Image (tube, rainbow, N blue to C red):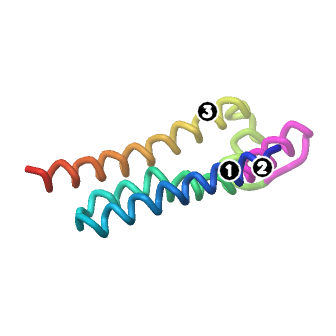
Amino acid sequence: MTIVLGSVDLLLYLAVAAILVRKYRHGKEAGFLWLAVPLALIPAISLPVSLWRHAAADRLIAGKEIGIFPFTLVEQGRFTIGALLTLLNFADHAVWGVFALAAVLVLVRRKE
């Protein structure tokens, strides 16, 4: 099920990227290329990262050692697995938000 949903997600991100590139080619507005980063590139890259996080969390829950930061913080008892995954999720959203804001600012600036 994970592979099927991941594949569907990837196809959707590729479709969004294709539409944004096509829109850029017609209007030469750089904001559409910038939008491709938060709407297609970052989500596509996050798919394998999510699978890695899932595997690392499963190993930690099973009591196995990971030895890779930031999962070492859980091994040291400084974070719970839930707190770490939440923190990583917020960090993902912060990166996404910065690129989304940059894209919107480029589009708005070009319109004025």
Is 21 left or right of 77, judged from the image as shown? left
The answer to whether mark 2 and mark 1 are in CB contact below 8 A is yes
Residue 96 placed where, x, y %?
44, 47
Residue 34 vs residue 9, the one in the foreground: 9
Amino acid type, mark 1: Val
Helix, strand, or loop for circle 2? Answer: helix
Q: Residue at x 70, y 30 (%)?
A: 82
Amino acid type, mark 2: Val
Q: Is residue 15 above or below residue 61?
A: below
Residue 35 placed where, x, y %?
37, 54
> Residue 46 — which label?
none
First to last magenta residue range: 51-66
Question: Which residue does the numbered mark 1 point to in the structure image?
Answer: 8
Q: Quadrant of the N terminus?
A: top right
Question: Which residue does the numbered mark 3 point to in the structure image?
Answer: 86
Residue 47 placed where, x, y %?
66, 53
Question: Which residue does the numbered mark 2 point to in the structure image?
Answer: 4
